Image: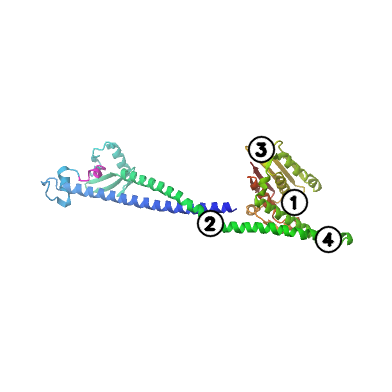
Protein backbone atom coordinates (compact mmCIF):
# COMPACT_ATOMS: atom_id res chain seq x y z
CA UNK A 1 0.00 0.00 0.00
CA UNK A 2 2.81 2.42 0.90
CA UNK A 3 4.65 1.60 -2.33
CA UNK A 4 1.48 2.34 -4.29
CA UNK A 5 1.15 5.66 -2.45
CA UNK A 6 4.73 6.57 -3.36
CA UNK A 7 4.25 5.56 -6.98
CA UNK A 8 1.05 7.61 -7.24
CA UNK A 9 2.80 10.65 -5.72
CA UNK A 10 5.72 10.33 -8.16
CA UNK A 11 3.38 9.81 -11.12
CA UNK A 12 1.14 12.74 -10.17
CA UNK A 13 4.07 15.09 -9.50
CA UNK A 14 5.93 14.23 -12.69
CA UNK A 15 2.70 14.42 -14.71
CA UNK A 16 2.03 17.93 -13.41
CA UNK A 17 5.62 19.02 -14.10
CA UNK A 18 5.48 17.47 -17.57
CA UNK A 19 2.13 19.10 -18.34
CA UNK A 20 3.38 22.54 -17.25
CA UNK A 21 6.58 22.09 -19.28
CA UNK A 22 4.67 21.05 -22.42
CA UNK A 23 2.22 23.92 -21.95
CA UNK A 24 5.07 26.45 -21.68
CA UNK A 25 6.81 24.88 -24.68
CA UNK A 26 3.59 24.97 -26.71
CA UNK A 27 2.89 28.61 -25.83
CA UNK A 28 6.51 29.53 -26.63
CA UNK A 29 6.41 27.71 -29.96
CA UNK A 30 3.06 29.21 -30.97
CA UNK A 31 4.15 32.73 -30.03
CA UNK A 32 7.49 32.36 -31.86
CA UNK A 33 5.76 30.94 -34.92
CA UNK A 34 3.23 33.79 -34.92
CA UNK A 35 6.03 36.39 -34.50
CA UNK A 36 8.06 34.75 -37.28
CA UNK A 37 5.08 34.74 -39.66
CA UNK A 38 4.38 38.39 -38.81
CA UNK A 39 7.99 39.31 -39.68
CA UNK A 40 7.70 37.39 -42.94
CA UNK A 41 4.46 39.13 -43.86
CA UNK A 42 6.10 42.49 -43.03
CA UNK A 43 9.05 41.53 -45.20
CA UNK A 44 6.72 40.56 -48.04
CA UNK A 45 4.77 43.83 -47.69
CA UNK A 46 7.99 45.86 -47.67
CA UNK A 47 9.21 44.06 -50.77
CA UNK A 48 5.94 44.85 -52.59
CA UNK A 49 6.09 48.54 -51.58
CA UNK A 50 9.70 48.85 -52.73
CA UNK A 51 8.97 47.07 -55.99
CA UNK A 52 5.97 49.31 -56.70
CA UNK A 53 8.00 52.43 -55.87
CA UNK A 54 10.82 51.24 -58.15
CA UNK A 55 8.37 50.62 -60.96
CA UNK A 56 7.00 54.18 -60.68
CA UNK A 57 10.46 55.73 -60.88
CA UNK A 58 12.12 53.20 -63.19
CA UNK A 59 12.52 55.71 -66.01
CA UNK A 60 14.11 58.41 -63.83
CA UNK A 61 17.93 58.31 -63.61
CA UNK A 62 19.50 57.99 -60.16
CA UNK A 63 23.10 57.72 -59.11
CA UNK A 64 24.05 54.84 -56.92
CA UNK A 65 25.01 57.14 -54.05
CA UNK A 66 22.07 59.52 -54.39
CA UNK A 67 19.01 59.34 -52.12
CA UNK A 68 16.39 56.92 -53.40
CA UNK A 69 12.75 57.91 -53.86
CA UNK A 70 10.24 56.71 -51.26
CA UNK A 71 13.07 55.43 -49.08
CA UNK A 72 14.24 52.74 -51.54
CA UNK A 73 17.88 51.74 -50.95
CA UNK A 74 20.14 52.89 -53.83
CA UNK A 75 21.64 49.43 -54.10
CA UNK A 76 18.16 48.09 -54.76
CA UNK A 77 17.78 50.42 -57.74
CA UNK A 78 21.29 50.01 -59.06
CA UNK A 79 21.47 46.25 -58.82
CA UNK A 80 17.79 45.46 -59.21
CA UNK A 81 17.86 43.40 -55.98
CA UNK A 82 17.39 44.44 -52.34
CA UNK A 83 20.23 44.37 -49.85
CA UNK A 84 18.70 41.39 -48.00
CA UNK A 85 19.17 39.15 -51.01
CA UNK A 86 18.61 35.88 -49.07
CA UNK A 87 15.13 36.90 -47.88
CA UNK A 88 14.09 38.30 -51.24
CA UNK A 89 15.31 35.21 -53.07
CA UNK A 90 12.49 33.45 -51.22
CA UNK A 91 9.85 35.77 -52.71
CA UNK A 92 7.93 34.78 -55.82
CA UNK A 93 5.06 36.48 -57.63
CA UNK A 94 2.35 36.04 -60.24
CA UNK A 95 0.71 39.03 -61.98
CA UNK A 96 -2.70 38.87 -63.68
CA UNK A 97 -4.26 41.33 -66.10
CA UNK A 98 -7.81 42.65 -65.87
CA UNK A 99 -9.06 39.67 -67.89
CA UNK A 100 -7.61 37.22 -65.38
CA UNK A 101 -4.86 36.04 -67.69
CA UNK A 102 -1.35 35.44 -66.36
CA UNK A 103 0.84 38.38 -67.28
CA UNK A 104 4.04 37.58 -65.43
CA UNK A 105 5.45 34.73 -63.33
CA UNK A 106 8.56 35.29 -61.25
CA UNK A 107 10.35 32.46 -59.42
CA UNK A 108 13.51 34.52 -58.80
CA UNK A 109 15.43 31.75 -60.58
CA UNK A 110 14.86 29.38 -57.67
CA UNK A 111 15.84 25.87 -58.87
CA UNK A 112 13.50 24.22 -56.35
CA UNK A 113 10.36 25.89 -57.72
CA UNK A 114 8.87 25.70 -61.17
CA UNK A 115 6.39 28.09 -62.78
CA UNK A 116 3.86 25.25 -63.04
CA UNK A 117 4.03 24.61 -59.29
CA UNK A 118 3.61 28.30 -58.56
CA UNK A 119 0.62 28.57 -60.90
CA UNK A 120 -0.98 25.50 -59.25
CA UNK A 121 -0.69 27.19 -55.86
CA UNK A 122 -2.18 30.38 -57.28
CA UNK A 123 -5.18 28.48 -58.68
CA UNK A 124 -5.93 27.08 -55.21
CA UNK A 125 -5.77 30.59 -53.75
CA UNK A 126 -8.10 32.00 -56.45
CA UNK A 127 -10.72 29.35 -55.66
CA UNK A 128 -11.21 31.04 -52.28
CA UNK A 129 -9.28 34.32 -52.43
CA UNK A 130 -8.21 35.89 -49.14
CA UNK A 131 -5.98 38.85 -48.45
CA UNK A 132 -3.28 36.76 -46.82
CA UNK A 133 -2.71 33.24 -45.69
CA UNK A 134 -0.57 30.14 -45.73
CA UNK A 135 -0.49 27.35 -48.30
CA UNK A 136 1.85 24.36 -48.81
CA UNK A 137 4.77 25.90 -46.93
CA UNK A 138 4.36 29.40 -48.39
CA UNK A 139 2.95 32.63 -47.03
CA UNK A 140 1.04 34.65 -49.60
CA UNK A 141 -0.50 38.07 -50.14
CA UNK A 142 -3.34 38.45 -52.62
CA UNK A 143 -3.63 42.02 -53.96
CA UNK A 144 -6.44 42.72 -56.42
CA UNK A 145 -6.60 46.12 -58.18
CA UNK A 146 -8.31 47.78 -61.15
CA UNK A 147 -5.60 46.60 -63.55
CA UNK A 148 -5.85 42.96 -62.49
CA UNK A 149 -4.39 41.17 -59.47
CA UNK A 150 -1.09 39.99 -58.05
CA UNK A 151 -0.14 37.17 -55.71
CA UNK A 152 3.15 37.27 -53.83
CA UNK A 153 4.60 34.20 -52.16
CA UNK A 154 7.29 33.85 -49.52
CA UNK A 155 8.88 30.52 -48.69
CA UNK A 156 8.92 30.27 -44.90
CA UNK A 157 10.61 26.86 -44.85
CA UNK A 158 13.77 28.15 -43.08
CA UNK A 159 11.70 29.59 -40.21
CA UNK A 160 9.67 26.39 -40.00
CA UNK A 161 12.81 24.25 -39.89
CA UNK A 162 14.33 26.51 -37.25
CA UNK A 163 11.14 26.32 -35.20
CA UNK A 164 11.16 22.50 -35.39
CA UNK A 165 14.81 22.37 -34.36
CA UNK A 166 14.07 24.68 -31.44
CA UNK A 167 11.07 22.52 -30.47
CA UNK A 168 13.16 19.33 -30.52
CA UNK A 169 15.99 20.95 -28.60
CA UNK A 170 13.60 22.26 -25.93
CA UNK A 171 11.92 18.85 -25.75
CA UNK A 172 15.20 17.03 -25.17
CA UNK A 173 16.34 19.61 -22.64
CA UNK A 174 12.98 19.32 -20.87
CA UNK A 175 13.16 15.52 -20.75
CA UNK A 176 16.67 15.70 -19.34
CA UNK A 177 15.45 18.23 -16.76
CA UNK A 178 12.54 15.97 -15.78
CA UNK A 179 14.93 13.04 -15.27
CA UNK A 180 17.01 15.27 -12.99
CA UNK A 181 13.88 16.41 -11.13
CA UNK A 182 12.75 12.78 -10.77
CA UNK A 183 15.57 12.05 -8.28
CA UNK A 184 14.47 14.62 -5.62
CA UNK A 185 10.81 13.70 -6.27
CA UNK A 186 11.60 10.07 -5.37
CA UNK A 187 13.28 11.13 -2.13
CA UNK A 188 10.39 13.52 -1.43
CA UNK A 189 7.86 10.72 -1.91
CA UNK A 190 9.70 8.59 0.64
CA UNK A 191 9.77 11.47 3.10
CA UNK A 192 6.04 12.13 2.64
CA UNK A 193 5.13 8.43 2.92
CA UNK A 194 7.26 7.91 6.03
CA UNK A 195 4.56 9.07 8.55
CA UNK A 196 1.98 6.95 6.71
CA UNK A 197 4.29 3.94 6.86
CA UNK A 198 4.87 4.53 10.57
CA UNK A 199 1.13 4.78 11.27
CA UNK A 200 0.44 1.67 9.18
CA UNK A 201 3.13 -0.30 11.00
CA UNK A 202 1.71 0.79 14.35
CA UNK A 203 -1.76 -0.23 13.24
CA UNK A 204 -0.55 -3.67 12.19
CA UNK A 205 1.34 -4.08 15.45
CA UNK A 206 -1.72 -3.02 17.46
CA UNK A 207 -3.96 -5.50 15.62
CA UNK A 208 -1.48 -8.31 16.19
CA UNK A 209 -0.96 -7.45 19.87
CA UNK A 210 -4.65 -6.91 20.57
CA UNK A 211 -5.57 -10.19 18.88
CA UNK A 212 -3.03 -12.11 20.92
CA UNK A 213 -4.16 -10.44 24.17
CA UNK A 214 -7.83 -11.14 23.45
CA UNK A 215 -7.23 -14.76 22.62
CA UNK A 216 -6.42 -15.86 26.20
CA UNK A 217 -9.46 -14.32 28.01
CA UNK A 218 -11.71 -15.48 25.19
CA UNK A 219 -10.48 -19.04 25.60
CA UNK A 220 -11.13 -18.84 29.36
CA UNK A 221 -14.66 -17.46 28.82
CA UNK A 222 -15.47 -20.18 26.27
CA UNK A 223 -14.09 -22.98 28.47
CA UNK A 224 -16.01 -21.80 31.54
CA UNK A 225 -19.21 -21.45 29.50
CA UNK A 226 -18.83 -25.00 28.17
CA UNK A 227 -18.31 -26.30 31.73
CA UNK A 228 -21.41 -24.46 32.91
CA UNK A 229 -23.37 -25.82 29.95
CA UNK A 230 -22.78 -29.35 31.26
CA UNK A 231 -24.18 -28.23 34.64
CA UNK A 232 -27.01 -26.09 33.25
CA UNK A 233 -28.08 -27.65 29.96
CA UNK A 234 -30.34 -25.73 27.57
CA UNK A 235 -29.60 -22.42 29.28
CA UNK A 236 -30.23 -19.70 26.72
CA UNK A 237 -27.84 -17.25 28.38
CA UNK A 238 -25.00 -19.73 28.14
CA UNK A 239 -25.93 -20.41 24.52
CA UNK A 240 -25.67 -16.66 23.81
CA UNK A 241 -22.23 -16.56 25.45
CA UNK A 242 -20.97 -19.54 23.44
CA UNK A 243 -22.42 -18.20 20.16
CA UNK A 244 -20.82 -14.78 20.55
CA UNK A 245 -17.56 -16.30 21.79
CA UNK A 246 -17.43 -18.41 18.63
CA UNK A 247 -17.97 -15.31 16.49
CA UNK A 248 -15.28 -13.45 18.42
CA UNK A 249 -12.88 -16.36 17.92
CA UNK A 250 -13.40 -16.21 14.15
CA UNK A 251 -12.73 -12.46 14.16
CA UNK A 252 -9.56 -12.76 16.24
CA UNK A 253 -8.20 -15.58 14.08
CA UNK A 254 -8.89 -13.51 10.96
CA UNK A 255 -7.08 -10.51 12.44
CA UNK A 256 -4.13 -12.71 13.35
CA UNK A 257 -4.05 -14.09 9.80
CA UNK A 258 -3.98 -10.55 8.38
CA UNK A 259 -1.25 -9.46 10.78
CA UNK A 260 0.84 -12.51 9.85
CA UNK A 261 0.36 -11.91 6.10
CA UNK A 262 1.15 -8.19 6.43
CA UNK A 263 4.40 -8.96 8.20
CA UNK A 264 5.69 -10.81 5.14
CA UNK A 265 7.08 -13.64 7.27
CA UNK A 266 5.01 -16.14 5.32
CA UNK A 267 7.42 -15.86 2.39
CA UNK A 268 10.18 -17.39 4.46
CA UNK A 269 8.21 -20.65 4.47
CA UNK A 270 7.82 -20.74 0.66
CA UNK A 271 8.71 -23.95 -1.13
CA UNK A 272 7.65 -25.83 -4.23
CA UNK A 273 4.54 -27.98 -3.70
CA UNK A 274 1.84 -29.77 -5.69
CA UNK A 275 -0.70 -27.02 -6.37
CA UNK A 276 -3.21 -29.38 -7.95
CA UNK A 277 -3.23 -31.64 -4.91
CA UNK A 278 -3.53 -28.69 -2.47
CA UNK A 279 -6.51 -27.20 -4.33
CA UNK A 280 -8.21 -30.59 -4.66
CA UNK A 281 -7.82 -31.38 -0.94
CA UNK A 282 -9.19 -27.97 0.07
CA UNK A 283 -12.16 -28.23 -2.30
CA UNK A 284 -13.13 -31.80 -1.40
CA UNK A 285 -14.25 -30.73 2.07
CA UNK A 286 -17.12 -28.74 0.48
CA UNK A 287 -18.71 -31.76 -1.19
CA UNK A 288 -20.69 -32.56 1.95
CA UNK A 289 -21.88 -28.97 2.10
CA UNK A 290 -23.05 -29.15 -1.52
CA UNK A 291 -24.90 -32.39 -0.77
CA UNK A 292 -26.52 -30.95 2.36
CA UNK A 293 -27.81 -27.82 0.62
CA UNK A 294 -28.58 -29.60 -2.68
CA UNK A 295 -26.28 -27.44 -4.75
CA UNK A 296 -24.48 -28.44 -7.91
CA UNK A 297 -20.75 -28.54 -7.23
CA UNK A 298 -18.30 -28.94 -10.14
CA UNK A 299 -14.52 -29.34 -9.87
CA UNK A 300 -12.14 -29.12 -12.83
CA UNK A 301 -8.58 -29.37 -11.56
CA UNK A 302 -5.64 -29.97 -13.88
CA UNK A 303 -3.17 -32.48 -12.49
CA UNK A 304 0.57 -31.96 -12.15
CA UNK A 305 0.67 -28.21 -11.54
CA UNK A 306 3.25 -26.98 -9.04
CA UNK A 307 3.78 -23.64 -7.31
CA UNK A 308 6.51 -22.02 -5.29
CA UNK A 309 4.71 -20.67 -2.24
CA UNK A 310 3.01 -21.50 1.03
CA UNK A 311 0.74 -24.53 0.71
CA UNK A 312 -1.34 -23.73 3.80
CA UNK A 313 -1.99 -20.21 2.54
CA UNK A 314 -3.21 -21.54 -0.82
CA UNK A 315 -5.54 -23.98 0.93
CA UNK A 316 -6.85 -21.09 3.03
CA UNK A 317 -7.38 -19.06 -0.17
CA UNK A 318 -9.43 -21.85 -1.76
CA UNK A 319 -11.43 -22.29 1.44
CA UNK A 320 -12.27 -18.58 1.65
CA UNK A 321 -13.41 -18.37 -1.98
CA UNK A 322 -15.50 -21.55 -1.83
CA UNK A 323 -16.97 -20.58 1.54
CA UNK A 324 -18.15 -17.28 0.01
CA UNK A 325 -19.41 -19.05 -3.10
CA UNK A 326 -21.57 -21.45 -1.08
CA UNK A 327 -22.81 -18.78 1.32
CA UNK A 328 -23.99 -16.39 -1.38
CA UNK A 329 -25.13 -18.80 -4.10
CA UNK A 330 -28.86 -19.12 -4.69
CA UNK A 331 -31.00 -22.03 -3.54
CA UNK A 332 -30.05 -25.19 -5.44
CA UNK A 333 -27.54 -23.07 -7.33
CA UNK A 334 -24.24 -23.99 -8.90
CA UNK A 335 -20.68 -23.61 -7.58
CA UNK A 336 -17.68 -24.30 -9.81
CA UNK A 337 -13.94 -24.36 -9.11
CA UNK A 338 -11.28 -24.90 -11.76
CA UNK A 339 -7.49 -24.86 -11.89
CA UNK A 340 -5.80 -24.59 -15.27
CA UNK A 341 -2.47 -23.61 -16.82
CA UNK A 342 -2.69 -20.37 -18.84
CA UNK A 343 0.50 -19.52 -20.73
CA UNK A 344 3.12 -19.26 -17.99
CA UNK A 345 0.60 -18.72 -15.18
CA UNK A 346 -1.82 -20.88 -13.21
CA UNK A 347 -5.42 -19.71 -13.18
CA UNK A 348 -7.73 -20.52 -10.28
CA UNK A 349 -11.38 -19.83 -11.08
CA UNK A 350 -14.32 -19.90 -8.66
CA UNK A 351 -17.88 -19.36 -9.92
CA UNK A 352 -21.25 -19.30 -8.23
CA UNK A 353 -24.76 -18.47 -9.31
CA UNK A 354 -26.76 -16.08 -7.19
CA UNK A 355 -27.45 -12.43 -6.61
CA UNK A 356 -24.00 -11.30 -7.72
CA UNK A 357 -22.07 -8.17 -6.77
CA UNK A 358 -22.92 -4.68 -8.00
CA UNK A 359 -20.20 -2.84 -9.93
CA UNK A 360 -20.02 -0.11 -7.29
CA UNK A 361 -19.12 -2.77 -4.70
CA UNK A 362 -16.67 -4.76 -6.81
CA UNK A 363 -13.82 -2.27 -6.35
CA UNK A 364 -14.24 -2.35 -2.54
CA UNK A 365 -14.81 -6.02 -1.73
CA UNK A 366 -11.10 -6.67 -1.04
CA UNK A 367 -10.97 -3.87 1.54
CA UNK A 368 -10.89 -4.82 5.21
CA UNK A 369 -14.23 -4.90 7.02
CA UNK A 370 -16.11 -3.99 3.82
CA UNK A 371 -19.44 -5.78 3.63
CA UNK A 372 -21.89 -5.50 0.76
CA UNK A 373 -24.87 -6.29 2.94
CA UNK A 374 -24.09 -5.87 6.63
CA UNK A 375 -27.27 -7.59 7.78
CA UNK A 376 -26.68 -10.61 5.53
CA UNK A 377 -23.02 -10.77 6.55
CA UNK A 378 -23.94 -10.70 10.21
CA UNK A 379 -26.37 -13.56 9.71
CA UNK A 380 -23.72 -15.61 7.92
CA UNK A 381 -21.04 -14.80 10.50
CA UNK A 382 -18.89 -12.64 8.21
CA UNK A 383 -16.82 -9.63 9.21
CA UNK A 384 -15.63 -8.50 5.78
CA UNK A 385 -12.14 -9.93 6.33
CA UNK A 386 -12.22 -13.12 4.26
CA UNK A 387 -11.64 -11.56 0.83
CA UNK A 388 -9.10 -9.17 2.34
CA UNK A 389 -7.13 -12.19 3.58
CA UNK A 390 -7.49 -13.81 0.15
CA UNK A 391 -6.16 -10.65 -1.49
CA UNK A 392 -3.15 -10.59 0.87
CA UNK A 393 -2.38 -14.26 0.16
CA UNK A 394 -2.46 -13.70 -3.61
CA UNK A 395 -0.25 -10.59 -3.36
CA UNK A 396 2.26 -12.45 -1.15
CA UNK A 397 2.50 -15.01 -3.96
CA UNK A 398 3.04 -12.25 -6.57
CA UNK A 399 -0.31 -13.03 -8.16
CA UNK A 400 -3.43 -11.14 -9.19
CA UNK A 401 -7.03 -11.49 -8.03
CA UNK A 402 -10.08 -9.99 -9.70
CA UNK A 403 -13.85 -10.30 -9.60
CA UNK A 404 -16.47 -10.24 -12.33
CA UNK A 405 -20.22 -10.13 -11.82
CA UNK A 406 -23.32 -8.80 -13.54
CA UNK A 407 -24.86 -7.97 -10.14
CA UNK A 408 -27.84 -10.20 -10.90
CA UNK A 409 -27.09 -13.87 -11.53
CA UNK A 410 -23.45 -14.82 -11.01
CA UNK A 411 -20.08 -14.00 -9.42
CA UNK A 412 -16.66 -15.07 -10.74
CA UNK A 413 -13.29 -14.81 -9.01
CA UNK A 414 -10.11 -15.07 -11.10
CA UNK A 415 -6.70 -15.68 -9.53
CA UNK A 416 -3.50 -15.73 -11.58
CA UNK A 417 -0.44 -17.24 -9.90
CA UNK A 418 3.11 -17.30 -11.32
Dot 1 corresponds to which residue? 327
Residue 99's disc number: none
Report the side of 254 relative to 110 (left or right). Answer: right
Q: Position of residue 228 (x, y in %)?
A: 86, 61
Q: Earlier in the sequence, mark 2 or mark 1?
A: 2
Q: Earlier in the sequence, mark 1 or mark 3?
A: 1
| 416 vs 230: above or below | above
Mark 2 or 1: in front is 2
- Residue 330 sits inside the magenta stretch: no
Dot 3 corresponds to which residue? 341
The Cα–Cα distance between marks 4 and 1, rounded to whole angstroms, is: 29 Å
Residue 211 can be seen, yes or no: yes
Q: Earlier in the sequence, mark 2 or mark 4?
A: 2
Q: Position of residue 32 (x, y in %)?
A: 34, 51
Q: Secondary structure at mark 4?
A: helix
Residue 225's disc number: 4
Figure quadrant of residue 114: top left
Dot 2 corresponds to which residue? 191
Q: Earlier in the sequence, mark 4 or mark 1?
A: 4
Amino acid sequence: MIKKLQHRFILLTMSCIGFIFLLILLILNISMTAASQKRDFDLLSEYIRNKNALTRHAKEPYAVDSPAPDGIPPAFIAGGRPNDWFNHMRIFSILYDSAGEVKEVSTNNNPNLSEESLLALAEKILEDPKGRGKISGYLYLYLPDKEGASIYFLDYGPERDMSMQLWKMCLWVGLAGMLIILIPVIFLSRWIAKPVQLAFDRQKQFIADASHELKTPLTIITTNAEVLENTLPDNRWLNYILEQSSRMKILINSLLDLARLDSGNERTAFQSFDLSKAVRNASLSFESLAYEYEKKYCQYITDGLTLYGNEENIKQLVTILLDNAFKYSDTKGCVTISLTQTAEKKQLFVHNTGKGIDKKDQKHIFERFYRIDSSRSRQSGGYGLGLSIADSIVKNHKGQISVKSDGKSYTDFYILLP
